[in-house]
Image (cartoon, helix red, strand yellow):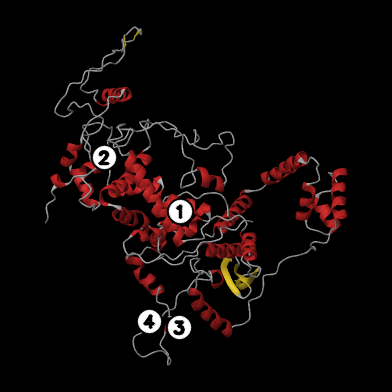
Amino acid sequence: MKRLRLERWSGQLLSPRTRPCCLRQVQIQRSLASQTRSQSSASTADIIHEDGEYEPVPIETSPPKLVPSTKHPRSQYASPPPSNALKSAKLAALHARLSLPSKVPLQTMARTLVDPSADSNANFNNASLAQLGGSIISYHVAEYLLCTYPRLPMTVLFAAAYAYNGPKTLQLIAKEWGVETAASPGSEVDPGLLQFSKVAPGTKLGEFGATTRPDSKQFYRRGISSRNVYDDEFGDTIPKDREEYEPLSQEQAYSSFVKAVVGSLFAHAGRDAAKRFVKQHILSRHLDISSLFVFKAPERELARLCKREEFEHPVARMLSETGRHSRSPVYVVGIYSGSDKLGEGAGPSLLEAKIRASVAALKAWYLYSPGNNVRLPSEMEAKGARPWEPVHIDLGEVIH
Amino acid sequence: MDSRLIRRPVLDLLSGRSQCLLSLNAASRRNESSYRRSKQRLNIKPDSSFLLGHNSPNQDHIVFNPPSSAPSVLHTPLKFLPKEDKRRQLLASTAARHQALDPALPPAVPVKRSVPHHHLSEADVKEIQRLKREEPDDWTCAKLARKFNCSTFFVSICLSQCGGDDSQRKKDMAEKLEAIRARWGPRRRKAREEKSKRYELANRGE
């Protein structure tokens, strides 16, 4: 077996441990320190006498005295120092489990696990890596979806992107990798644990806060084209001016960790490695896109489609039936345009069978795929790639 | 397309593979006492298409005889393939062969068209609106449709431009409907709910 030489792993992302002395940071560190190290620090609880008189203890202006011990060594940093990364078994195991190339150093892996809410210093948290990785992931997912299913309507495209790289999926992926969260962030925790400030229990995770949309008064303006312009890749509003060090949900922390891993892979090992990683961990998952459709008036939509594409008007034809005038009849109806069958559906009534057949026909239209091994634009970046042949670009979804 | 977004993470959609396990309910479980009975029940005579006949090949071969099922939506019909797609020719030759075997199309599902279309003039529309404006309670949609021999849908389009205030009537009708619903028993209520659920599922194709 080949031995890993950890001391040889180095990276351009590592910077010396120098921090600007910012006032806010010191305050955060103080509050964190007083929270986490209450065991060793002096208790400052208010005193209530037996007769019920309340006597507030005067608040000390100096920081609470920390008594360093071997278990909780005193540190002025909010996250574990990079030198600890080489000693962490969890981190090395995670690195090996993901079979990351040795170009990605353990110190950067440790940095991907530190959320801005744990350490607000941008040189030591994963904010920049997550930003980079998130855009790489969403680019690969989007090009895969657009080239494989060129006719998908915008709503289904949003839903499919959410299913592939939404925060819920990224959280599941990170949990599958075996990443656990630290109870509370600090410099003494194992660098192999995900560190972030947790939201206090009972806090309402507000969805209706301020957004980056310019139409704050017209909050009802949430059409699909407006989502295209203002919202993120899943059609969700982007929250405005969230402070980086605010506590956040576990889902967000896990998802920015996964993004940061892709970002660090891109920074250290290059474009191809990041693309391969996204393909293996995110795009390899099975998603039944046909279950993401909802139609409102499928028969009318199909008629509009046939008119737009200059096919004959769709006609429902009875393929077979059983049990008419009984309690549970079954009708099998096919939708024909001219002599070509577009879709087929079965149902307990003629109307329902017709609806199902129309839905099947519409899904067959929207789920057209030029093939599974269609060339993606990112393949052109490889050396000596064949000249690009244009992919199929559709007219757009049916408007009725 | 509906503008609602369906939100679910990708791992929830893995149901395709686990369906088989889920369908193993308590009734189909075997144990020692029921082994012989269930074995006997499975001892069915094979379909004639699986049996060897005088025209079947002598050497080893694969019998491809899938059970009848709804066609997959991932198989794009010939008409929906774009012009530059290479599968077009292949499917066209297959379709031509099928067409030659059975040229007749199945019978069309009868469409109820009890009222004629596009037969009312501008004056008729004005008359509909006048009647409604003058006696709104008397001239209901159905009554007007009967008088002018057109659909209630067309009458409702005409009356949307009539300019009268029908909010009170709408409220009354909603109350009436609510009173009727309140009289339903548990069976009818359940049947109605199931029907609406079924149509919702049909609109999603599930």
Is any part of residue A148 visible from this angle?
A: yes
Query: Which residue is label 4 attached to?
Result: B62
Instruction: Check disc 2 and report its element: helix, strand or loop.
Output: helix
Image disc number at residue A111: 2
Tag 1 and tag 2 share a subunit: yes
Q: Nearer the viewer, mark 1 or mark 4?
A: 1
Where does the image place residue A96, in percent across and percent down from the top left? 21, 51
Image disc number at residue B49: 3
**Residue drawn at x 15%, y 40% as measured from the top left:** A87
Query: Which residue is label 1 attached to?
Result: A160
Amino acid carrying mark 2 in the image: Arg
Q: Name the chain letter of the residue that bears numbered label 4.
A: B
How far apart in space, not on screen, are marks 1 and 2 (Cα)? 30 Å
Residue in front for this viewpoint, A61 or A375:
A375
**Residue drawn at x 38%, y 71% as measured from the top left:** B37
Instruction: Check disc 3 and report its element: helix, strand or loop.
Output: helix
